[in-house]
């Protein structure tokens, strides 16, 4: 399954990169990575979804090969504006949206601000309050303040990932080394704007996601890692109670980084969910068309 990179320019003149897989004429799936991640983290999911979908993954501003920006712009409003510009660039009317952590928050806010645009929504391990309080929020703030900007060699960089993400599979570790880090004359540095992202994460108040959860108007699946310190089970249950569109799933032996820790299971859950939801919507549309033609 081949992938190719494209660029577009957002409304502020920033150049943003995205990666494409699958069948261009199939159902579009837009993929948003987490806080310090990158578009190609979704390659295994795109491969699992195959030719039944047109997968597009964005290097969100400050990450991957996209332009960096002022730290003050690393906030939900800017990310959602970029997403809206990306959707317009792709010429999409309706699509599936998938997001992990930061990308999940951006996906939820997009859904709130753009009702009626999504076939379905999949959110990986984030919910209201996740970024504000709790062990996971404290861990990420600690990581933001303590992460080195440069490593002396690749072994040191790999050791950093093993210590901070002990659940990472070998493939996920190799992906992070390849796509989130680079060799420079100084040493091994981040491809993303680590300094600016850290400044933003430590100074900007996270968006309250409850309004977005309550406003959801499409089938939505929240996937939680059973060992997650970021999305409590109680929040998962409260979201399901708050909106009938919400379904939930939990993956055993996975942390906040479900698609890295248990990729095969995560990919199967997403593929099965989308297959079921899109089949149901197609059946409903066919029935409605038959009813109208019989009037």
Image: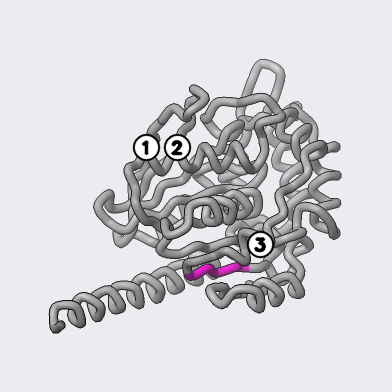
Residue 49, image x and y in percent?
39, 61
Tell me if residue 140 comes above or below residue 13 in the rendering: below
Tell me if residue 117 comes above or below residue 199 in the rendering: below
Is 135 left or right of 12, judged from the image as shown? Answer: right
Residue depicted at x 34% and y 51%: 93
Marks 3/1: CA–CA distance: 28 Å
Quadrant occupied by the C terminus: bottom left
Among all residues in the image, which is located at the extreme front? Answer: 295
Tell me if residue 52 comes above or below residue 148 in the rendering: below
Read off the residue under disc 3. 125
Q: Secondary structure at mark 3?
A: loop
Disc 3 vs disc 1: which is toward the camera? 1
Is 139 left or right of 14, judged from the image as shown? Answer: right
Which secondary structure is most common in the magenta stretch?
Answer: strand
- Which residues, given as a range, are shown in magenta? 219-223
Read off the residue under disc 2. 85
Where is residue 79, by image quadrant? top right
Q: Are marks 3 and 1 in contact (CB under 8 Å)?
A: no
Instruction: Judge whether residue 235 is colored magenta.
Output: no
Instruction: Judge whether residue 222 is colored magenta.
Output: yes
Q: Are marks 1 and 2 in contact (CB under 8 Å)?
A: yes
Residue 242, image x and y in percent?
65, 74
- The numbered dot on residue 230 is none
Read off the residue under disc 1. 89
């Amino acid at each position: 399954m081949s992938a190719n990179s494209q660029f577009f320019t957002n409304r502020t003149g920033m150049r943003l990169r995205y990666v494409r897989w699958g069948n261009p004429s199939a159902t579009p799936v837009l993929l948003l990575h987490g806080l310090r991640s990158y578009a190609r983290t979704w390659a295994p999911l795109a491969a699992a979804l195959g030719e039944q979908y047109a997968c597009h993954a964005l290097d969100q501003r400050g990450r991957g090969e996209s332009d960096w920006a002022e730290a003050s712009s690393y906030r939900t409003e800017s990310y959602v504006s970029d997403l809206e510009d990306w959707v317009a660039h792709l010429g999409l009317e309706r699509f599936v949206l998938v997001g992990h952590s930061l990308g999940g928050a951006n996906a939820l806010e997009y859904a709130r601000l753009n009702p009626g645009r999504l076939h379905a929504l999949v959110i990986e391990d984030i919910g209201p309050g996740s970024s504000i309080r709790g062990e996971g929020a404290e861990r990420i703030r600690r990581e933001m303040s303590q992460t080195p900007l440069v490593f002396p060699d690749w072994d040191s960089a790999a050791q950093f990932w093993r210590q901070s993400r002990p659940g990472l599979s070998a493939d996920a570790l190799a992906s992070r080394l390849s796509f989130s880090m680079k060799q420079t004359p100084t040493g091994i540095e981040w491809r993303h704007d680590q300094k600016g992202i850290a400044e933003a994460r430590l100074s900007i108040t996270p968006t309250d996601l409850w309004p977005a959860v309550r406003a959801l108007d499409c089938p939505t699946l929240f996937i939680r890692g059973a060992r997650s310190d970021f999305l409590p089970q109680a929040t998962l249950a409260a979201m399901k109670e708050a909106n009938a569109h919400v379904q939930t799933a939990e993956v055993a032996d996975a942390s906040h980084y479900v698609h890295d820790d248990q990729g095969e299971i995560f990919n199967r859950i997403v593929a099965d969910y989308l297959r079921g939801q899109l089949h149901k919507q197609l059946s409903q549309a066919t029935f409605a068309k038959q009813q109208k033609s019989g009037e």
